[in-house]
Image (tube, coloured by chain):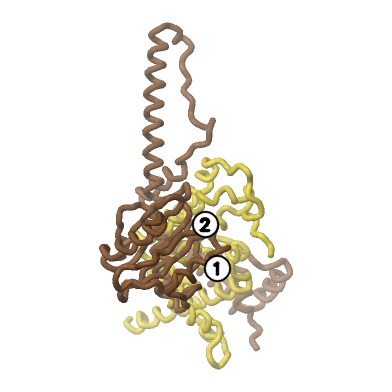
Chain colours: A yellow, B brown
Amino acid sequence: MTLLPWKRTVRESGPQTSAFEDLALPLLPSLYNVAFWLSRNPPDAEDLVQETFLKALRGFATFEPGSNFRAWIFRILRNTYLTSRTGLAAMRTVALEDELDDRNASGSALYPEGAIDRKTPEKNLIRLSDRAALQAAMEKLPPPLLEVILLCDVEEMKYREIATVLEIPIGTVMSRIARARTALRAELQVNVTPREFRA
Amino acid sequence: MSDHLSHSMLNGLADGELSADQLAVANEHLAGCPACTSNALYQSLLKSATAKAGQRYTPPPHLQERLTRLASRSEAPGTGTGHRYPQQWRFGWGWVAAAVLLLVSASTMLLQRTTRKTELASAEHAALVTEVFDQHVATLAGSLPPQVVSTDRHTVKPWFQGKLPFSFNLPEGLPRDTTLDGANLTYLHNQPVAQLLYSIGKHRVSVFVREKAGGASTDEAPAEHAGFHVMGFGTGDLEGVAVSDVDPARLAELVSEIRGAQTGR
């Protein structure tokens, strides 16, 4: 079994706390933002971030300097979320749905090529400028798709980094990103139609 | 079969994840396919729009302050800011002033350190309560039986042999309506702990027993968390914490029996 870079060695003397402060505090806005998206309420987001900081501080002696601190602390955040009340409830709710999302009963892709309206790009482009509509569409994503889109688009992580944080293969990262974006596009297209009819 | 670029190619293009070869193929296709060009543009715009829309929540100032204090709670030796005194302070009064200043500085630092330690202990205790609560709720929600299913303490206790770096006693007599259901080996703050599962009437109880550590300790004072009662206890080298939604008095009876079993009462 390959050990993860930050678990490769445990140094005899841990790094200075000021190093942790320097590395962790700049990530606080990102961690809180992702925590809030996942937990959907301020108290749970605060608890999640605080617990993440405590765990990271305690385990900082095992962190390998020079390796990816951001991926390391985001992984702690994600694992803490998974064992939290909201995480357990959310992941249990979508577990079955998540397995079925890739393909439906007939074996065809759930979001076929036709789900994307290639003929009316201008409508889609206009819709993208509606920040509230996009946030509403993101809120409808199941947690496994939301977390991958947050890490990829908002945190600008590479696929390999995301795979490390979520502990899933890169292929799964790619398929989840594809599904998340297809779902967002579909949601934005669905929402645009009634407005046009009203006009 | 479609000749258009696949979803994964379009996403890879937007995310900058295509290899040089893939990028060349994609560019060649895009040069002659308006539909895919439009689609690729949309995918890139969707990515940047999602990035902006996703930056939605900012941490409240009190959280920032709390975590800043937490992160800097133990400054490394030698990194503190030293006081530089002017050279002309060579007279007696100068030394007195310096001594007073040092005394005040030391007192302030001591006070700050004590405050930080208190805050850290409080935060760690809150995190422990949350973790214990999450583990209990996960056990209640899980469909799997306990790792060791038995009402017999002579079965449950030996099951932990070789699994935990400590041993503990289970009470022989239990309060009214209380039964031992089994136990799990679990982890709190990365430490192995015994999760003893009891029922008081129809209420489920988890009692976590672990070796005393330097970190967060269980507070003897009962606490409330999301409607559940959390009760800590400590005996010798062991400490425990019980969590349940049962009446606190009945939970205290069970905790008292478990504590008594450790001291041989």
Residue B166's label in the rendered image is 2
Q: Secondary structure at mark 1?
A: helix
Residue B8 x %, y % = 62, 75
Name the residue that disc number 1 marks. Answer: B44
* Residue B113 is at least partly visible in this image: yes
Callout 1 amino acid? Ser
**Count of residue discs:** 2
Residue A158 x %, y % = 60, 62
Q: Is there one chain holding both mark 2 and mark 1?
A: yes
Q: Residues within 10 Å of mark 1 (few under 14, many from 20)?
A: some
The mark that comes first in sequence, 2 or 1, is 1
Q: From the viewer's perspective, is residue B95 above or below residue B192?
A: above
> Label 1: chain?
B
Looking at this rendering, what residue extends furthest in the right direction? B21
Of badges 2 and 1, the one in the foreground is: 2
Q: From the viewer's perspective, is residue B143 above or below residue A165?
A: below
Callout 2 amino acid? Phe
